[in-house]
Amino acid sequence: MSLLHLCFFSAFTLSSLGLAFHRTHLISALLCLESMMLSMYIALAMWPIQTQTPSSTILAILMLSFSACEAGTGLALLVASTRTHGSDHLHNFNLLKC
């Protein structure tokens, strides 16, 4: 495994561990999701260079656009939940209530 693959794998792993263990605030969960998407984007952008293919892939740009949509939706949910519940603590949310 090259150093580049190790860096991407460790960034994705640390982001997923942060998402699993530090779920006190919604903003920290959203930041962990964004760092996971960023590490996957960089890995997909570097993939044609590593495999030495002459054509660039559209997959990285497509994932970047989905990541932007995910960030916008996450921030909208953060604002809506802060307005209704008063804070962004995840333990205040009850998923069984409508």
Image (cartoon, grey):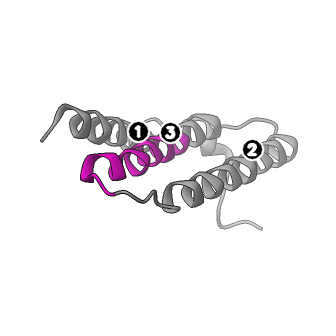
Sooner in the amino-acid sequence: mark 2 or mark 3: 3
Q: Which residue is mark 3?
A: 32
Mark 1, Cα crowd under 10 Å, few <14 / some 14-19 / many 20+, is many
Determine the residue positioned at 32% across, 39% down: 8
For disc 2, the neighbor class at 10 Å (few under 14, some 14 to 19, many from 20) is: some
Q: Residue furthest front?
A: 54
Residue 57 position, x and y percent, is 46, 60
- Magenta stretch holds residue 45: yes
In the rendered image, the vertical position of residue 62 relative to residue 9, given as above or below:
below
Q: Amino acid at mark 1?
A: Ser
Is the C-beta separation of discs 3 and 1 under 8 Å? yes
Q: Nearer the viewer, residue 58 or 7?
A: 58
Q: Residue at label 1?
A: 15
Name the residue: 50% across, 55% down.
60
Left/right placement of residue 95 relative to residue 16 reads right
Report the residue marked by disc 2.
75
Q: Earlier in the sequence, mark 2 or mark 1?
A: 1
Identify the mark nearer the N-term, 3 or 1.
Answer: 1
Instruction: Tell me how far mark 3 sits from mark 1, CA to CA.
Output: 5 Å
x, y (%) of residue 66? 63, 58
Q: Secondary structure at mark 1?
A: helix
- Tell me if 38 is positioned left or right of 18 in this view: right
Relative side of 49 to 18, left or right = left
- Asked whether 94 or 29 is in front, the reply is 29
For the record, the magenta segment spans: 32-53
Residue lying at the far left in this picture: please name it.
Answer: 1
